[in-house]
Amino acid sequence: MRLIKFTTLLLLLLVAFTSQSAIAFQNDTIFNQRDNNNLKQGFWKKRYPNGNVAYQGFFKDDKPRGIFKRYHEGGPIKAFLSYSPDGTKSKVKFFYLNGKIAAEGSFINNQKDSVWKYYSQTQKLVYEESFSNGKKDGIYKSYYDDGSTYETISWKDGQMHGDLIQYYKDGSYKAYAKFVAGVQNLTSALTLDKLI
């Protein structure tokens, strides 16, 4: 009789412990830790109100490190980020709900940097642009559906600076304008086919 009571008690404790562990896991209480300075440390996972995972990744001293994943509320992956060891730089890919790439580029200190590319849902390159410290800097280029160049725009320090050229699908010039520090030089705006 004593053995039955002991076994029953042991089973009840085991069930209670297992239930508490499952609840803790579902509520992410064994993740999402902060240190004494209130900085995120270790593995973090957050959920949407519907219970689906919103993001998961690793933090050290409140900065993401390594692989970090964000999800659409419906479940599929929204962004895949690969952080540098110090957490200041990341390479990122954003995804449509169907899992196809929507955009890719880099961040430095949470600001866009380097060349960013944007794709249609059929995976055709729609446009690309360059950034430095979160500001457009370099050439912006957009494309027709067939991949030929539609438009190029020069940017410097977040402002149009230089040539804006539009092209027909056959590659011939359509329009031209010149910008200096974000201001269009009105004498330069013309339709190039009128000159030919």
Image (tube, rainbow, N blue to C red):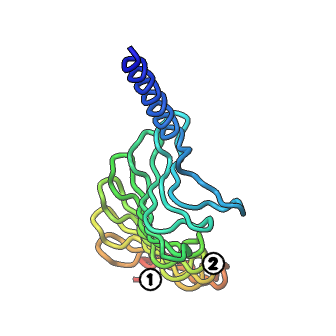
Rounded to the nearest angstrom, the CA distance separating label 1 from label 2 is 28 Å
Crowd around label 1: few <14 · some 14–19 · many ≥20 (10 Å): few
Quickly name the residue at label 2. 159
Q: Earlier in the sequence, mark 1 or mark 2?
A: 2
Q: Secondary structure at mark 1?
A: loop
Q: Position of residue 160 (x, y in %)?
A: 60, 78
Q: What amino acid is found at the position of numbered circle 1 in the picture?
A: Leu
Q: What amino acid is found at the position of numbered circle 2 in the picture?
A: Gln
Q: Residue furthest top?
A: 1
Quickly name the residue at label 1. 195
- Residue at the spot 44% in from the left edge and 33% down from the top edge: 18
Q: Locate the C terminus and report the quarter of the image it occupies.
A: bottom left
- Residue at the spot 62% in from the left edge and 68% down from the top edge: 61
Comparing 71 with 21, the one in front is 21
Q: In the image, is residue 34 above or below residue 71? A: below
Drawn side of residue 80 relative to residue 64, left or right: left
